[in-house]
Amino acid sequence: MVPATVSGRSASAREYLAAPLVGLVRNPRSHRNKGHHPDLEGRKDVLLAEPETRTELEQALARFAEAGIGMLAISGGDGTVRDVLTRGAPFFGDSWPLVAVLPQGKTNALALDIGVSRNWTLDEAIAAAMRGSVIARRPIIISDAAAAIRDRWGFIFGAGVFNAAIDAGQVAHRFGAFQSFAIGVTAIAGMTQALFGFGNSPWRHASRVVFTDAKTGVPLPHSHLGAPDTRYMAGFTTLRRFPLGVKLLAGIDDSASIGYFLIDAPRRRALSLVPVAAMGWHGPAVEKLGMHRGSGEAFNVSMDSGFILDGERFPAGNFRISAGPELQFVAP
């Protein structure tokens, strides 16, 4: 396998003179990975792993790195991609292979961002790799300030009402709603609760969380609405395309590392404008209502209520959100 530089969708796109050796991580618990797949048996070009635990995942990734794979294929949802990148970082270091996402999970935001359809196959990904068709994306890395736990890699960090949204999303999944439909159901339910809910509805609560720019030490913008050390919603991501045509980061330069969208307080007037803000409308009037968007290279965060990273809840603490290395994702 000898890589050769070619022109393509990225300056660092590569074309293989022969098909790359593929390390395939197939999550057996992912929504669309049920059952037996005889087409994967006996292939000389594919090293297959179907880990049941994170320890087994690490062992598989160590084997892939030692074998010198040219492409790491991940069959699952956003959570599977998060776990593979997080567990693979110590083994691949600064020399990641091409990464192919085969969207088989309940949610696949990364696949949507890079233009991969839910029916994309491993063979199609291999053919695209041989053409040098790749897109560069940088994950976000969540580092514990006390260095008590390993860095976590992912693409969408959420705090505040994201916790309630994850719980509602799980309910939607149990009723058979997946992908954009599940997101739509969750959004409608959440907006209804936020606008008309009373009492102890989790959709009406702000959380204690403080964000500062890690480079300048300056706190991120905050209006006079709500306490200065609370936010209703906070989202950070390196992605730019979202389900349902959402454009929360409209106006943020695509070359910017990490984009963010913040809502200070669950004021009904502000929340009633979230749908139009989500479609790209923004300006001084929106900022006065406590909605902010911006970007940066790295942020420090102190929080009491935990955070969501690519669909999984993690404990509260003090963290640094930074842009990871540029990875090359195979694209159609």
Image (cartoon, helix red, strand yellow):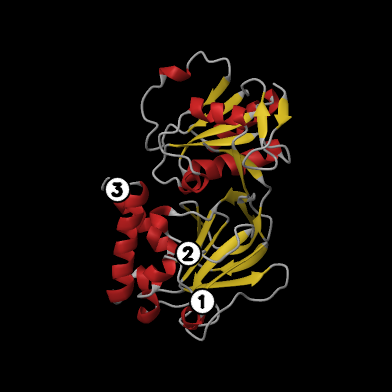
- Crowd band around label 1 with a 10 angstrom C-alpha radius: few (<14), some (14–19), many (20+): many
| Residue placed under numbered mark 2 in the picture | 248
- Callout 2 touching callout 3 (CB < 8 Å): no
Instruction: Identify the residue at image location x=31%, y=75%.
Output: 195
Q: Position of residue 182 (x, y in %)?
A: 33, 52
Query: Along the horizontal axis of the image, is 84 left or right of 31?
Result: right
Quarter holding residue 55:
top right
Q: Position of residue 219 (x, y in %)?
A: 63, 76
Quarter holding residue 206:
bottom left
Which of the two labelled residues, at mark 2 and mark 3, occupies the earlier sequence position? Answer: 3
Is residue 200 visible to the viewer in this orientation of the structure? no
| Residue placed under numbered mark 1 in the picture | 230
Amino acid type for the residue under numbered disc 2 = Leu
Q: Secondary structure at mark 2?
A: loop
Q: Position of residue 209 (x, y in %)?
A: 54, 71
Q: Nearer the viewer, mark 3 or mark 1?
A: 3
Is residue 99 visible to the viewer in this orientation of the structure? yes
Query: Along the horizontal axis of the image, is 9 left or right of 48?
Result: right
Is residue 183 placed above or below 208 in the rendered structure? Answer: above
Quarter holding residue 77:
top left
Which of the two labelled residues, at mark 3 and mark 1, occupies the earlier sequence position? Answer: 3
Is residue 231 placed above or below 238 in the rendered structure? Answer: below
Residue with the most extreme top position? 42
| Residue placed under numbered mark 3 in the picture | 177
- Quote the CA–CA distance across marks 2 and 3: 23 Å
Q: Position of residue 231 (x, y in %)?
A: 49, 74
Q: Secondary structure at mark 3?
A: loop
Amino acid type for the residue under numbered disc 3 = Ala
Amino acid type for the residue under numbered disc 1 = Thr
- Crowd band around label 3 with a 10 angstrom C-alpha radius: few (<14), some (14–19), many (20+): some
Which of the two labelled residues, at mark 1 and mark 2, occupies the earlier sequence position? Answer: 1
